[in-house]
Image: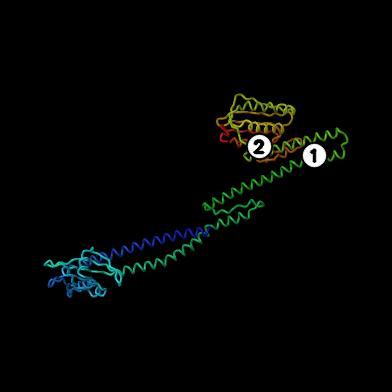
Amino acid sequence: MRFKLTFFYTAIFTGLIAVMFTIAYYLLSQDLESTATTELLERGSALRGYFRFEDGKPVLPAGEGDFEIAAFIRTASRYMQIYDLESGELVTQSPDLNILGFSFTRREVDGISKEPALVKVDTDKGRFLFFNDRLVGADGHAFFLQVGEPLEPSDEALRRFARLALLLLPLGVLLAGTSGYVMAGRALSPIRTMAKTAQDIEVANLDRRLPLLHNNDDLDRLARTFNDMLDRLQHAVSEMRQFTSSIAHELRTPLTALRGEAEVALLQAKSIDDYRGLIGSQLEEFEKLTRLINQLLTLARAESGELRLDIRTFDAAALLDDVVETFLPVAAEKGIKIHFDAQQKISIDGDPQWIERAVVNLLDNAIKYTQEGGTVWVDLAQGPHDSRIEIRDNGIGIPQSAVAHIFDRFYRADSARGKEIDGVGLGLSLVKWIVDRHGGTIEVNTRVGAGSSFVLHLPRGAGKEH
């Protein structure tokens, strides 16, 4: 990337410099040519005014009386010649022009006199610019006047400029390439640091993060994005470790019990009743394992997105009434009362099966953690923006330190870890998933020894996007 950036920067810089030199060369040549043309026109027009006719032929005064006029005439007539247009004969020619070998026949004079006032001629001594004009005497006799000026100074200036450009262009390209390489290295240095840090991050040190320059630029945003990804990855790995540890813990207990019972039976059981009791006890453990595996599969399919919501409008009061009716025998067996009184029909937009699953899990927990003689309340209400389902009990409650973790998989508060209370800590995780998929929230209010309250807030039109 560093080489590509340097090459790209150098190529653009080279192109810009080349275009600038080309434009400058063109503008300089046009300016020099315009200057030469203007000077020649002014010089030729001024020189024409000094001619006098003697014996019918044009001549220039010596200008002895005025030094400036004499100097001008000598300079202006350095490259000058005059031809008689009638005879085609050469009347006068300056020495410098004679050296160039300028001599025309009568036909050539007639042709030249008809050309534009300004013409360029290439000679062995370089390029010349000539001003063509006519001189007419008092008797009407016409002469052809040609005054020239060498373009060699202009051409030499252009050549020097070109040589300077050819010298400066490689130096500029070299300087641009060097500076571009250094600047690209500095710009990419944070990326190399990020790459090195990313290479050093492993599962064992997921708490490391990419460094930030605090410039609020694209590199900082890239580093923050990677750090956010590492946060999610660290959280996922932590959950996976907890998940694996929890599975091992939950599976070890029933498997150990099964193994112990089998060993005892082999050593002590002697009758059919003994074996029948063993098999009955093992069936209970198998039921726990089956329930655990089914809950794991359901939660795994839910979190992987395999389970879809069937959103429709349903009667929430009727659904809660059915759930309460199902749990009445279970609650009565423990001496617990369930109160549910729906004053009006309230409709909810959602998946009735999953909402029922969430209510079942919460009601099951409420009955489990409520002592004999306690009460469980099920309330349904309609707010201005959402529907509210509350499951409340006066049971053992949840420690405040555990409230933040009760929706984690396999988490069970210490007060709930007695063997007399069945469960593996997956019910509330599934409730959280159901409510999240419906776009709702869960409100938890609890106090140890006073009971707990779980309130499901389901917005109107909940889950319609699924």
Nearer the viewer's eye, disc 2 or disc 1? 1
Work out whether 286 lies above or below 125: above
Q: In the rendering, which numbered label is found on residue 258?
A: 1
Task: Identify which residue, 367 or 85, lies in the foreground.
Answer: 85
Instruction: Work out which residue is located at the far top of the displayed protein and give it.
Output: 343
In percent of width and height, residue 52 lies at: 15, 70
Give me the C-alpha separation between circle 2 and circle 1: 28 Å
The kind of residue on which mark 1 rests is Leu
Determine the residue located farthest toward the left in the rendered image. Answer: 139
Q: Going by the picture, which residue comes out furthest to the right?
A: 270
User: What residue is drawn where x is 63% and y is 41%?
Assistant: 304
Mark 2 lies on residue = 430
Look at the numbered discs 2 and 1 and tell me whether their residues touch, using CB distance below 8 Å: no
Considering depth in this image, is 249 or 52 the residue closer to the camera? 52
How packed mark 1 is, by other alpha carbons closer than 10 Å (few <14, some 14-19, many 20 or more), is many
Q: Position of residue 407 (x, y in %)?
A: 66, 39
Left or right of 268, for residue 382: left
Pick the front one: 59 or 424: 59
- Element class at badge 1: helix
Question: In the visual, does 105 lie left or right of 321?
Answer: left
Q: Is residue 450 above or below residue 166?
A: above
Q: Earlier in the sequence, mark 2 or mark 1?
A: 1
Q: Position of residue 76 (x, y in %)?
A: 23, 70
**Total label count?**
2
Quarter occupied by residue 121:
bottom left
Q: Quadrant of the C terminus?
A: top right
